[in-house]
Each structure stands twice: as C-alpha cells, then as structure tokens.
Image: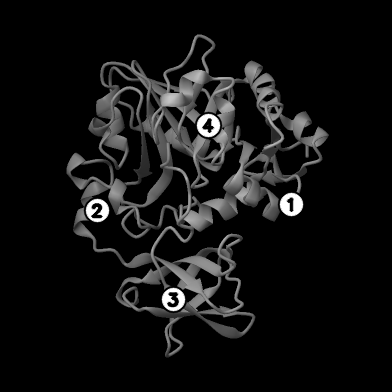
Amino acid sequence: MSDYKKTVLFDEHNNLGAKMVPFAGFMMPLQYDGILKEHNYVRNEAGIFDVSHMGEFFISGKNAKKFIQMVTTNDIENIIPGKAQYSAFCNEDGGIIDDLIIYHLGDQYMLVVNAANIDKNFSWLKKNLIEDVSLENKSEKYSLLALQGPKSKEFLTKIFPEISSLTYYETLLPNRDGVIIARTGYSGEKGYEIYAPNDLAKAIWIKILNLSDGIHPVGLGCRDSLRLEMGYCLYGNELNEGTTPIESGLGWITKLSTNFIGSQKLISNLPQKKLVPLISNERAIPRAGYDVFDKEKNNIGVVTSGGMSPMLKQGIALASIKKNFSVNSEFYVKIRDKYFLFHKTRLPFYKEGTYLSD
C-alpha cells in the first residue's frame, strides 16, 4: 500500500468502513455500503464522492485562450467567465490523449484531467507551450469532492448559499479561501463538484456529511455504474490514443475549424469504427473486452464498457463497432461461449437523470 498515494480523506474513508482499492496510483474507496445501494443513494437522494485523485492544471497569461484553443478539441471561444466546457486533448494523429473539463475562472482557466494521465498530460502541454502562457500543475494542492443526486442543491445551499443560482456547467469563481464550486459531475444527476485546497477538504467533507441522513459517502464502484447508465465515456475504455473523438461519439465536442492539434488528421482520415450503445432484454451481463458479432456471427467489434443497469434491470453496453457494421440494429455479445442478443439504442440508457433540472 505504501507505493500508492493517499488523498487527504484517506483516514475518513477507513473510519467509515470503506473498501479501499488501488486506482490510478491512489488508494481510493470502492464502496462503503455496497455498489448497488450507493448507486440508488445518488439516483434518489445524494452521495458524496472523494475524487481528489483527479488532476488540476491552471493556465493564465495573455495567450492562455489561444493556447487552450490549440490543444483542445472544443471551441474555447464559446465559454465566458463562470462557465465550463467538456473537451479533449488529441495527439498529432487525432487519437485521444485525455478528456477533460475546462473551467473559465475569469483571469485564469482550470483544466481538470484524469488521474492516470496527469503526468502525461502535463508533459504534453509543456511540450506545446507558447509564449505569454503560464501553466501550473496544482493537482497535489487541491482536493475534489463531488456531491451528486437530486437533493444535492437542497443540502449544499445550507453551507454554500451562493450555489443556488448555478445551472448545468456553470461555476463560481474561487472564493477568498480558494474554493471553487461548479455545477458539474459524472453521474447524470444534479450535482456539484467542490475544488478545495487540501487543508480545507476534510472540514468540508465532514460538514456536508453531517448536513443530513440523506447524504451518503459513495465510492468509485457506483461512479462507474452511474456514468455507464448515462453513456458517459471513460478514459482507458472508450477513450485512448488509438481512438479519435469522432470514433468515440464525441463529435459534438470536436470543432475541426479551430485547427487544434490532430484536427488535420481527423479531416483527412475517415473513422474506422463507431461507439454504439447496446441494450438486451435477455439475462445477459456484458463486460469490457467481450467480443461483439453480427447475426452471421462475424466478429465486428468489442464491448468497451458494460454491466447490469441497476435502474433498468437490463444488460447495457458501449461497444466499439467496425464502421460499416454500425448501422446494424441487432448485435450479439458472446458471454461464456453463448451469444446474447442486444439491440442498438439511444443514449442515455437511463433517461430520468436530474442533471439539467433546477
């Protein structure tokens, strides 16, 4: 365990009886009361995650916007101070280095990246840095708490009344303590992400948990099942350097006219595969790595993420399918030497999420 990093809340998780597991170089809470229970807490009440393993980069300077436009796929011109944007970094070949959220904080930008990619991302950004841009990696100085669930606003306004006016993908500017609160999340429910200097994180975590019996500590296990029900991509599963944003269903954050790194390859090279959401009426639980076939039993792709949806009680999957077969309506996933029928569907799988509600 000594080889793994710990968040500042490590002792709190142990005190709460969390099952701790290695994840992206950290010891992180997988679950407390069980993944299914915690999934339902977030869908019906509120759950608080410690996701302090995520990385935070701060970019400022005269050419900050120009630099971000160059290294990210979305159009940074579309956000003003107090807004956030989902985006990605691409390599020269158009493959995804990472996905991220950009927060416009007025005089600076905060880029939040995946934990496993912090060092890789920072090195890549430094390599591409231009004049009059300041780039800082503050990942080890910040903790990230995510309060998610339909009752999250009702609870969090008791501590931070200023969040009451935030709508989806809006952020407050840093307060005098350096705390940043945004209406973002990875669950499909109304929720808030609280970026706090490490010395404040424990007090905020305890204060939130003590607000109500309707707030539960929840772990990374249900974070994965929640994001899958929404069809949200996960780096290492749907996203990797051999897959383009177009092939991952992220064409909506890929603005080729901005001429970002990798955009020319995306213009000249046609997609070779497509991310397809699949659902089954059979008793089938698909898992990442399972092969996908057409009705003639030709191997046409692979499941990138899959499982049993706790809310739908059906097997669901995201699958990377060879482009010319992606128009099919029926697919077969091979599970323990048996072929199970899956149908193409529309995302999100779970359509009752409250993330857009007031």
CA distance separating discs 3 and 2: 32 Å
Identify the residue shown where x is 76% and y is 47%.
Answer: 33
Quick one: label 3 or label 4, which is nearer the N terminus?
Answer: 4
CA distance separating discs 1 and 3: 30 Å
Q: What colour scheme governs how the chains and residues are painted in the rendered image of this protein?
A: one colour
Which of 33 and 71 lies nearest the eye of the viewer? Answer: 33
SS of the residue at dot 2?
Answer: helix
User: Quarter of the image holding residue 299?
Assistant: bottom left
Residue 137 visible? The answer is no
Quick one: label 4 or label 1, which is nearer the N terminus?
Answer: 1
Q: Which residue is mark 1?
A: 34
Eye-nearest disc, 2 or 4? 4
Residues tagged 4 and 1 counted as in contact (Cβ below 8 A):
no
Q: Which residue is mark 4?
A: 153
Eye-nearest disc, 3 or 4? 4
Q: Which residue is mark 2?
A: 265
Q: Which residue is mark 3?
A: 343
Q: Which quarter of the image is occupied by the C terminus?
A: top left
Which of 342 and 258 lies nearest the eye of the viewer? Answer: 342
Seen as rendered, the residue at the extreme bottom is 296
Identify the residue shown where x is 44% and y is 54%.
Answer: 239
SS of the residue at dot 4?
Answer: helix
CA distance separating discs 2 and 4: 43 Å
Quick one: label 1 or label 3, which is nearer the N terminus?
Answer: 1
Callout 3 amino acid: His
CA distance separating discs 3 and 4: 36 Å
SS of the residue at dot 1?
Answer: loop
| Residue 132 at x, y percent in the picture | 29, 17
Please determine whether, in this image, residue 156 is positioned above or below residue 115. above
Residues tagged 2 and 4 counted as in contact (Cβ below 8 A):
no
Callout 4: few (<14), some (14-19), or many (20+) C-alpha neighbours within 10 Å? many
